[in-house]
């Protein structure tokens, strides 16, 4: 029996009524990717208020790698609720904060002593990583990358690249932020081709020190090992080794933003492991606590100790419920070998999506690492014009046929795959069948409407 079961039109009457209430009660700036409202979720399945069952290929934007309501996580939350819910770690500390910090210190790449700060969100973790880097280096400047996404708070938004909807109208931004091109080989900023380019974009960091900002004023380079919101771009392996070597030479800290790539998503616990790099600071969130609001900043002990007493923290930071969930989520990822499962999911996706790319010119590139996969859609393979409207049509088709799928990319033309890693092969293929049907309908209707584009 298929997992997807639709009992009403999408959206159903109860979802439509809730949407009307939402429009009156919630600011328009809070977006929603699908037109349905959730009633319950389990594993890789989501049920809406009208009783329709969907396969979830978004996973709360990469938050439920261990699955919706992972049994270990639910049990840990119930146990913690029976003990206490909040004291504030800065007032009356508790053991689970320390246990989670110890666990993350052991998991994060790097054969050196580490310490971990717990906060509430990825954006908050990024902001704290910059605070710590500036305190340690006594330097003000930060280098980030085109197509990056680091959050919506002021400093995180300043680091974020995409203008609409994230930055437009919210100026002015934080100062001492400098942006350089990422290794987005499909859309190379220099018009070069890999590998003959010699990974020019990475070496360009040295040129930046001569023409844009002096190296001795740069505290850190902050980078996503795989672009998240920017389109799931996985750069060549040499990119990061070159960046890290340059940073070391100039005594600049390397901050890895693993908010979306962490906890098994790319086929390793952290994507840095896939690239063989050891950042000075690693930022994690999303699937860290399987849906509870929690993020972490883990780094070299001497770096993490640079801030003075009271300079770090927050009322809810490292909430005991979130810590309990995180310890259980990590145990699930390790015990159920979900990083290995991510690699298998990626293999299944590759086999199917690359066949689609040969069939439909609408598909410009299939890419990603592990189970962090994407399809970039273009109007023509030679000019690579972003197919934003077609992307939106595909998403609407998927939602109407029982699949939760979301987009990404600076141009809004990338389909991104963030399935819970506990998804079965049968469920994965059922969902991919919907994606295939959606691409087929949009691509073939487009050809019929505009024969010159065929």
Image (spheres, rainbow, N blue to C red):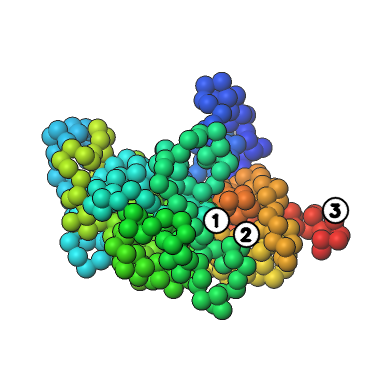
| Residue extending furthest toward the top | 24
Q: Secondary structure at mark 3?
A: helix
Q: Is 155 placed above or below 208 here?
A: above
Judging by the rendered image, the residue that carries numbered circle 1 is 231
Which of disc 3 and disc 2 is earlier in sequence?
2
Q: Quadrant of the C terminus?
A: bottom right
Discs 2, 3 touching: Cβ within 8 Å:
no
Label 2 Cα crowd, 10 Å radius (few <14 / some 14-19 / many 20+): many
What mark, if any, has residue 136 been given in the picture? Answer: none
Q: Residue at x 58, y 51 (%)?
A: 410
Query: Which x, y percent locates residue 100?
Result: 22, 51
What mark, if any, has residue 449 been given in the picture? Answer: 3
Q: Quadrant of residue 263?
A: bottom left
Q: Is 21 placed above or below 207 here?
A: above
Query: Which x, y percent locates residue 233?
Result: 52, 61
Query: Which x, y percent locates residue 228?
Result: 48, 54
């Amino acid at each position: 029996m298929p997992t997807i079961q639709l009992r009403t039109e999408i959206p159903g009457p109860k979802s439509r009524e809730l949407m009307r209430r939402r429009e009156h009660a919630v600011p328009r700036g809070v977006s929603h990717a699908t037109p349905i409202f959730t009633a319950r979720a389990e594993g890789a399945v989501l049920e809406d208020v009208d009783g329709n069952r969907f396969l979830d290929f978004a996973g709360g934007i990469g938050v439920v790698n261990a699955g919706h309501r992972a049994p270990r996580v639910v049990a840990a939350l119930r146990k913690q609720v029976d003990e206490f819910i909040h004291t504030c770690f800065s007032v009356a500390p508790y053991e689970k904060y320390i246990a989670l910090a110890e666990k993350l210190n052991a998991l994060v790449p790097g054969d050196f002593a580490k310490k971990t700060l717990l906060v509430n969100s990825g954006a908050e973790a990024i902001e704290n990583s910059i605070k710590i880097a500036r305190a340690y280096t006594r330097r003000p400047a930060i280098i980030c990358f085109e197509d990056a996404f680091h959050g919506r708070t002021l400093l995180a938004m300043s680091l974020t690249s995409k203008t609409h909807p994230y930055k437009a109208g919210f100026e002015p931004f934080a100062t001492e932020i400098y942006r350089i091109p990422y290794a987005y080989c499909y859309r190379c900023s220099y018009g070069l081709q890999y590998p003959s380019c010699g990974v020019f974009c990475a070496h360009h960091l040295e040129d930046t020190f001569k023409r844009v900002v002096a190296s001795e004023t740069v505290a850190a380079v902050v980078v996503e090992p795989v672009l998240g919101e920017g389109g799931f771009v996985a750069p060549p392996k040499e990119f990061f080794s070159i960046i890290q070597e340059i940073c070391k030479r100039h005594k600049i800290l390397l901050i890895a933003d693993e908010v979306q790539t962490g906890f098994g998503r790319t086929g390793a616990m952290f994507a840095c492991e896939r690239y063989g790099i050891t950042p000075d600071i690693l930022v994690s969130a999303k699937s860290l606590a399987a849906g509870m609001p929690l993020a972490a900043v883990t780094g070299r002990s001497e770096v993490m100790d640079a801030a003075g007493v009271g300079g770090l923290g927050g009322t809810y930071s490292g909430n005991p419920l979130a810590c309990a969930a995180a310890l259980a989520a990590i145990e699930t990822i390790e015990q159920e070998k979900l990083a290995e499962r991510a690699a298998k999911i990626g293999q299944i996706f590759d086999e199917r999506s690359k066949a689609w790319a040969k069939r439909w010119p609408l598909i410009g590139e299939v890419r990603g690492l592990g189970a962090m996969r994407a399809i970039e859609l273009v109007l023509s393979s030679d000019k690579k014009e972003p197919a934003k409207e077609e992307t939106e049509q595909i998403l609407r088709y998927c939602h109407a046929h029982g699949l939760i799928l979301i987009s990404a990319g600076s141009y809004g033309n990338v389909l991104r795959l963030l399935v819970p890693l506990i998804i079965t092969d049968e469920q994965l293929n059922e969902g991919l069948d919907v994606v295939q049907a959606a691409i087929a309908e949009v691509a073939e209707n487009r050809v019929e409407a505009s024969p010159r584009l065929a």
